[in-house]
Amino acid sequence: MRLVVIALLLAATVSCVWSKIEVTPLTSVTYSPKPKDCEIQTFSEFPKDRSYVEIAILVTSQVAQANNPLADPDLNSVLADLKPKVCELGADAIVIKSFQPKSGHGTAQLVVTAIKFKN
């Protein structure tokens, strides 16, 4: 029993990560929130073939537990943490402006623009 508890505590420690999301609105218009697991398209540059509105800039900082290389944040984990907030804003897609995978002490930072496509 003691071994199981130790293994569970170790697993929780390995995956210990916290995130902070800062949102800067770019419009006074608000859109209906989508479900937290909504489909969000991801672009590396702004789409040229569709009209859109820029909704907000989001800056996400994700910090892994100190001295734990197994839990270092990567782009996929940062995007996963960001997705519910993007859905809450009613966005259809995000455009990645910058990503710093690890800047000291296991911190990753992602800057994106949330966009809403015009019909």
Image (tube, rainbow, N blue to C red):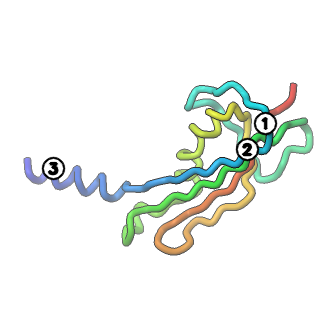
Picture layout, residue 102 above or below residue 95? below
Q: What amino acid type is highlighted by mark number 3?
A: Val
Q: Which residue position is annotated with label 3?
A: 5
Of the image marks 3 and 2, the number of the one nearer the N terminus:
3
Mark 1 sits on what residue?
28
Element marked by disc 2 = strand
Q: Residue farthest to the bottom?
A: 104
Name the residue type under label 2: Pro
3 and 2 marks in contact (CB < 8 Å): no
Q: Of the residues under marks 3 and 1, which one precedes in the sequence?
A: 3
Badge 1 crowding class, 10 Å Cα cut-off, few under 14, some 14 to 19, many 20 or more, is few
Location of the C terminus (image quadrant): top right
User: Measuring 69% from the left and 31% from the top, which residue is drawn there?
Assistant: 90
| Alpha-carbon span between mark 3 and mark 1 | 50 Å
Coordinates of residue 116 in the picture (x, y in percent): 78, 34
Distance from the alpha carbon under mark 3 to that under mark 2: 44 Å
Q: What residue does disc 2 label?
A: 25
Q: CA distance from mark 2 to mark 1?
A: 7 Å
Q: Secondary structure at mark 1?
A: loop
